[in-house]
Image (cartoon, rainbow, N blue to C red):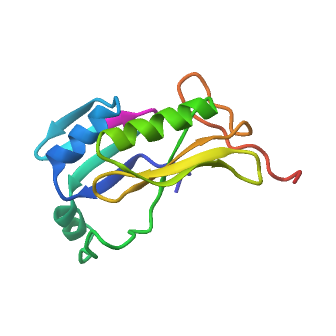
Amino acid sequence: MEQRISLITLGVSDVARARAFYEALGWRGQEVEETVFFQAGGLALVLWGREKLARDCGLGDRGEAGFGGIALAYNVRSAAEVDDLLATAERVGGTVTKPAVTNSLGFYSGVFVDPDGHPWEVAHNPGFALAEDGSITIPDFSDL
């Protein structure tokens, strides 16, 4: 198996509401058969009905109240962008669950959850430089 992620699918309770939320953040999606696809750099973020996704995965739905065991991360180019994105997410219906702070490693981050409870960390980490297209290269940690 090659080391790559091609799609991240979020099970949502209301596809139209979820699409409106992500589009209010500036994303542009395409809907096909009650499924919304967003191109996100070299991968895609997909919004699909939570029950359909659980059924398709052969799983029972744990409900919206529980943590689904996944957190998404979005790295930005400055601390100001962290603050701006957290404020925008809150303004358009998300909930900031962790206000931005600088951690002991020196990166600045906070977390918001979308209307379906999917957590997004927004981070400015000078050690994870962003390419022009927004992709990151994991630094060599062997010297630490």
Residue placed furthest toward the right: 143
Seen at 14% across and 40% down, the residue is: 32
Prevailing secondary structure of the magenta residues: strand
In the displayed structure, does residue 15 sit left or right of residue 130? left
Residue 51 in the image: x percent, y percent?
17, 66
In the displayed structure, does residue 133 sit left or right of residue 88? right
In which quarter of the view is residue 59 placed?
Answer: bottom left
In the displayed structure, does residue 27 sit left or right of residue 119? left
Residue range highlighted in magenta: 38-42
Given residues 106 and 42, the one toward you in this image is: 106
Magenta region includes residue 23: no
In which quarter of the view is residue 58 placed?
Answer: bottom left
Q: Where's the C terminus, which quadrant?
A: bottom right
Count of numbered labels shown in the rendering: 0
Residue placed furthest toward the top: 132
Residue placed furthest toward the left: 33
Residue 18 vertical placement versus 56 (above, below): above
Seen at 34% across and 59% down, the residue is: 117
Residue 29 vertical placement versus 133 (above, below): below
Residue 47 in the image: x percent, y percent?
25, 49
Residue 133 in the image: x percent, y percent?
53, 25
Seen at 18% across and 46% down, the residue is: 17
Seen at 53% across and 37% down, the residue is: 83
Given residues 43 and 29, the one toward you in this image is: 29
Residue 83 vertical placement versus 56 (above, below): above
